[in-house]
Image (cartoon, helix red, strand yellow):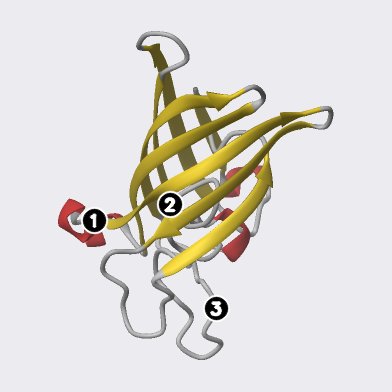
Amino acid sequence: SVTATWSPEFLGTQLPYVSVFGQYQSYRRFGPGLVWAAAGRLGMADAFGRELVAAKRFFAGGGNSVRGFTQDGVGPFDPLLGVPAGGAVVVVVNQELRFPIFGPASGAVFYDAGAVYSTLRDVRLGDLRHGMGAGLRLRSPIGLVRADYGFNPWPRPGEKRSVFYLSIGQAF
């Protein structure tokens, strides 16, 4: 799917911007109960020489993005507040092997990579952050309950080496 948003100044906005976000998901069965799930996301935005407002920035990291990081923990941080600042470009790639365990229980092993860049000029695919791990899934009356343990193999100062997530539904 692809989503494009344009807010031009000539229509009266005081916050002009253009944004495009695309995502792709693929699921392949390999034998009884084995599923290889893959997803990719790419987003770009521009505020025409102005600063992109926080509500229109992209974020990555967390249980439905790059696991092994805290929520929105991949990408630039506000130096004064120490909170995720988001950016004008996001790249996220997820790979997951899902397998049955017993009855309503299943498991998964995953590898995620992603980055958030302040501007398009900052994009360097060698700067992708990596997360990997494993999880348990349980089919329940309220839907799929998911517990994932994500590991950050190269944490930066102040980052956790691992994060536990408890969620409802698949990551993607």
- The secondary structure type at the circle numbered 1 is loop
The residue type indicated by label 3 comes to Val
- The secondary structure type at the circle numbered 2 is loop
- The secondary structure type at the circle numbered 3 is loop
Instruction: Find residue 66 and name its label.
Output: 2
**Real-space Cα separation, disc 3 to disc 1, in angstroms:** 21 Å
Question: Could you tell which of marks 1 and 2 lies nearer the N-terminus?
Answer: 2
**Real-space Cα separation, disc 2 to disc 3, in angstroms:** 17 Å
Instruction: Find residue 123 and name its label.
Output: 1
Q: Name the foreground residue: 54 vs 6.
A: 54
The image shows residue 98 at horizontal and vertical percentages of 45, 28
Q: Name the residue under label 3.
A: 83
Q: Mark 2 or mark 3, which is nearer to you?
A: 2
Question: Could you tell which of marks 2 and 3 lies nearer the N-terminus?
Answer: 2
The image shows residue 39 at horizontal and vertical percentages of 40, 31
Which residue is found at the position 35% from the left and 11% from the top? 30
Q: Mark 1 or mark 2, which is nearer to you?
A: 2
